[in-house]
Image (spheres, rainbow, N blue to C red):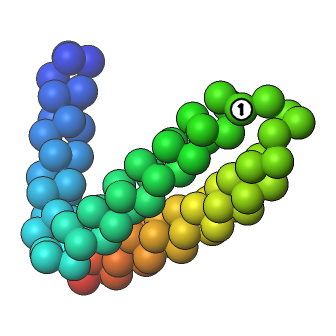
Amino acid sequence: MATATRKTRGTAARKKAVAIDSALGAEKNELLEELAAEAKVYIELLRKLKSIPESDLRRADLEGELYGSIAHLSTHATLLLEEIDKAIDRL
């Protein structure tokens, strides 16, 4: 019985996810791409930062860029969450 309930919940969750995906439309793809692109920037900056010693003068610049990247990630994630919330409200 528990397995049947889990399958039903899983199916309902998948249907809701598909409905949200449809409601988001093309806007979602653009927002996801922007978030993914900024995540790549963040990862690359973090990799560079980890590879240079504390005494390296480039650290300050990299830390500033990393801070900016984190701010961009936050902005892109917030925009995506807002669009998902709007899509859910339309369902």
Q: Residues within 10 Å of mark 1 (few under 14, many from 20)?
A: few
Task: Give how far across and how far down residue 59 sits, in percent.
Answer: 77, 47
Residue at 82 percent across and 48 percent down: it is 57
Residue at 53 percent across and 62 percent down: it is 73
Task: Give how far across and how far down residue 53 sits, in percent.
Answer: 79, 30
Classify the position of the C terminus by image quarter.
Answer: bottom left
Q: Is residue 63 visible?
A: no
Q: Is residue 1 visible?
A: yes
Q: Looking at the rendering, which quadrant does residue 66 occupy?
A: bottom right
| Residue at image mark 1 | 52
In the displayed structure image, the side of residue 66 where residue 53 appears, left or right: right
In the displayed structure image, the side of residue 29 where residue 46 appears, left or right: right
Closest to the observer, 61 or 12: 61
Tally the marks.
Answer: 1
Q: Amino acid at mark 1?
A: Ile
Residue at 50 percent across and 43 percent down: it is 44
Classify the position of the N terminus by image quarter.
Answer: top left
Q: Residue furthest right?
A: 55
Closest to the observer, 79 or 9: 79
Residue at 55 percent across and 69 percent down: it is 72
In the displayed structure image, the side of residue 72 where residue 50 appears, left or right: right
SS of the residue at dot 1? loop
Closest to the observer, 19 or 38: 38
Task: Give how far across and how far down residue 51 sits, in percent.
Answer: 65, 29
Task: Give how far across and how far down residue 64 sits, in percent.
Answer: 73, 62
